[in-house]
Amino acid sequence: MSSSVIGIDDLAMATGGFRIDLADIAERLGADPAKYYRGLGQTEMSVVAEDEDIVTLGAAAALPVVERAGRERIRTLLFATETGIDQSKSAGVYAHRLLGLPPNVRVVELKQACYSATAAMQFAAALVARNPAEKVLVIASDIARYELGSTAEPTQGAGAAAFTVSADPALLALEPAAGVFTEDVMDFWRPNHRVTAIVDGHSSISAYLDAVAGAFDDYRAQGGSAFEAINRFCYHQPFTKMAAKAHQYLAKHAGADVPTETLTAQVAPTMGYNRRIGNSYTASVYLALLALLDDPADLTGERVAIASYGSGAVAEFLTGTVMSGYRAQIRNGTNEQILADRPRIDDNTYLARQRIMPRSDPSNYGNRHETRGPFRFAGVREDQRIYEATAPR
Ligand code: CAA
């Protein structure tokens, strides 16, 4: 048994509980705030509360999706992250319990830098093709951390996206063609002993552009649509200017004759959430899709590209079409409220938070109750992470 229409049925987000305006770190970093606002296309970044991590953010994003889908329909949970909290146990198993999912669910964590949620989506689509009654829950959750004082610091962030893949989806029907591209490059990585990533910033931008172009060429070779036949483009957004750069690069690479204002309109509505959250790694391209779907313009029937990039490097380019009636499934206003609810912190408060990690005794510590989210990371006792549900404050 198989279903011809498979895609994203529901999509929601969560973000770190605090925010810092990038103007507030510019002075310490000796930069003009315009470099961040206009040069990188970023205004703020989310900062996690002491008792938030990838599990609490991911489960918070997934909660409304699971409640709407029905827990009994979900038989697979794929947790995509590059902020792994354990070398063995999947972050998804903690999320599975917090979300109240039944025992008959397969749970696994996937890693390939910022790319792995797209691999998860493709694996999910294959599972749904085998059993169209199943919904697969994908959670993408990350906290981006670079060295304080580095040029990468303003491109940190924290956020999660959660979505279900199902037959007869309410939001986006995935088209069969997908292009992939892999090349072993050292543009960005995080060895096991580090809490911050190592990045070669400018070469990472070239690696991103090459990989996305390589994935697009493969997409075309697999029967995918011409550039001109795609209405909107959701790119991975380590900073939103990167999406604008990638789009111009890809248009030129594809030899497309598209006016500049059209190119802008094809990506601008995807940037609203990432501009304020910062880099959320695996979640970023799905937060771009969410911002697009929340845009007031009616997208029904439009072809939308997802251009996913994960340093190291893997890229995938695929398309889907927006389902009629999708507006009934989006949570108008909720996502804007999530962003508006984050209290603003100053540079000193932010620096103090960043310096909590790594802990002096990583085997035993407690976390203050700060999060406003539905779940909290209470601390570590004898090397076991303690998660609990909490009434929103
Ligand atoms: N007003 C307006 N714009 C200004 C400005 C000012 N006063 N000063 C500088 N700018 C502009 C620059 O012209 C530049 O824009 P263009 O690239 O369009 O020319 C932009 O601001 C950035 O300036 P720099 O290139 O001088 O910035 P930088 O050297 O300080 O670092 C960075 C920028 C390399 C992105 C750095 O922040 C970084 O390393 N970030 C992390 C790595 C990253 O995000 N890489 C992206 C691709 S890899 C990926 O996507 C995977 C992932 O998630 C990490």
Image: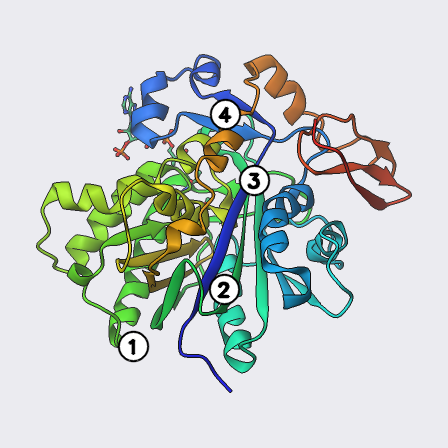
What is the three-letter code of the residue carrying label 1? Gln
Count of residue discs? 4
Disc 3 versus disc 1: distance between alpha carbons? Answer: 34 Å
**Which type of secondary structure does the marked residue at label 2 adopt?**
helix
Q: For the C terminus, which image quadrant? A: top right
Q: Nearer the viewer, mark 2 or mark 1?
A: 2
**Circle 1: is it few (<14), some (14-19), or many (20+) Cα within 10 Å?**
some
What is the three-letter code of the residue carrying label 2? Met
**Circle 2: is it few (<14), some (14-19), or many (20+) Cα within 10 Å?**
many
Q: Nearer the viewer, mark 3 or mark 1?
A: 3
**Is the residue under label 3 in contact with that under label 2 (CB below 8 Å)?**
no
Q: Is residue 75 visible?
A: no
Q: Which of the pair 358/106 is nearer the observer?
A: 106
**Is the residue under label 3 in contact with that under label 4 (CB below 8 Å)?**
no
Q: Position of residue 163 (x, y in %)?
A: 53, 55
Q: Position of residue 43 (x, y in %)?
A: 40, 25
**Which type of secondary structure does the marked residue at label 1 adopt?**
loop
Ligand 1 has an atom within 8 Å of the beta carbon of the residue at disc 3: no
Ligand 1 has an atom within 8 Å of the beta carbon of the residue at disc 2: no
Q: Name the residue that disc number 4 marks.
A: 340
Disc 4 versus disc 2: distance between alpha carbons? Answer: 29 Å
Ligand 1 location (quadrant): top left
Q: Name the residue that disc number 1 marks.
A: 222
Q: Is residue 127 above or below residue 108?
A: below
